[in-house]
Image (tube, grey):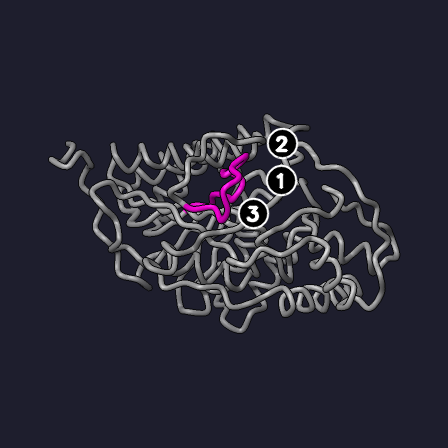
Amino acid sequence: MVSGNGARPQPALAPRGEDRVLVTGCAGFIGAAVCEALLARGERVLGIDNFNPYYDPRLKRDRIERIRHSPHFRESAFELAELDIADRAAVGALLADRRPGRIVHLAAQAGVRYSFENPQAYVDSNLTGFVTLLEAARAAGNVAHFVYASSSSVYGANTKQPFSIDDPVNQPISLYAATKRANELIAYVYAVQFGLRLTGLRYFTVYGPWGRPDMAPFKFARAIFAGKPIEVYGHGDMRRDFTYIDDIVDGTLKALDETTRFGDIPHRVYNLGNNHPEELLRFIEILEQAVGKPAQRILRPMQAGDVRATAADIDATSRDLGWRPTTGIETGLPRLVAWLRQYDATS
């Protein structure tokens, strides 16, 4: 029954530490780091991943091994379910059986450019998978908070900088961006109609150790190590709000924990970005310094789906969640390079 303010009654909050946290995409870059952070503070974690081959699944398996060898790992506190979030029967049965009290939904088909090559993968994972998980959470009836990953890509063709959560986001320029915006709209409906507490996080260019090999920080560093050329799109005239993984994890957990700042409709969206956009050429210079050799640069025009600049307005995030990033690229990129040097030497 819909309440007088237009929203359905919300599920009661489960005490922290007494319920499982479901993390989808647990073998992904952000997902694995979130799992480690949850385990470090004594949470029980149920992870879901399908280890798809968009990039080398070995890196995903290695992230799971990292979790299992972390100092806070306990066999009884971490469970891995290897399945696809678009599998309605499997997801529904898992949530009905394990009954997680909170969800951090990070599984998705990533990549802007790949969405032009394989659009169906984005529909299956980012749309069908998202609704499948929402339906399973609704049926379980005990999910107190559902945090999901959106993206800075939803700002699309917007030219106003920095991007604010109050800005219109009606001009996506890639299917990936459109699916992430669709997630926000679908989540809003589930908040209105079913009373689910939902928080969307618009991540801005996340990088760091154990990162994604299809993204520029990892890809450029590895190419510079190998003496191979890097392709610099937009002829280098681009700016990105590069955000370090530890800051992203901190913001994600702060969002998960903050359950009081909902209005009549229990849905909200926040930016998680470094709040300090960097020139792409400056970013490359710092990578070169960390690696210890110059990059061979091939300048290319802008690619389909790319935007010239991203910058996050984090005023609402700081006000509501008490979150501010602390790691600039001068610190974060050398950490990425040091990790990659060791990882490639031992794997």
Q: Secondary structure at mark 3?
A: loop
| Residue denoted by label 1 | 111
Q: Residue furthest left?
A: 4
Q: Position of residue 244 (x, y in %)?
A: 57, 61
Judged left or right of residue 341, residue 40 is left
Q: Spatial distance from mark 3 to mark 2, Cα to Cα?
A: 19 Å
Residue positioned 41% across, 40% down in the render: 167
Q: Which residue is most to the front?
A: 160
Q: Dot 1: what SS?
A: loop
The outermost residue toward the top is 120
Q: Are marks 1 and 2 in contact (CB under 8 Å)?
A: yes
- Mark 3 lies on residue: 310
Number of the front mark, 3 or 2: 3
Per the image, is 53 magenta?
no
In the picture shown, does residue 118 fall above or below 280? above
- Which type of secondary structure does the marked residue at label 2 adopt? helix
Q: Residues within 10 Å of mark 2 (few under 14, many from 20)?
A: some
Front-most of 282 and 251? 282
- Specify the quadrant that holds the C terminus: bottom right
Q: Which residue is mark 2?
A: 115
At label 2, the amino acid type is Ser
C-alpha span from label 3 to label 1: 16 Å
Crowding at mark 3 (Cα within 10 Å: few <14, some 14-19, many 20+): many
Residue 82 seen by the camera: yes
Q: Which residues are magenta?
A: 148-164
Residue 155 inside the magenta-drawn segment = yes
Left or right, residue 119 beside residue 78:
right
Q: Do we see residue 76 in this rendering?
A: no
Residue nearest the observer in this picture, 204 or 50: 204
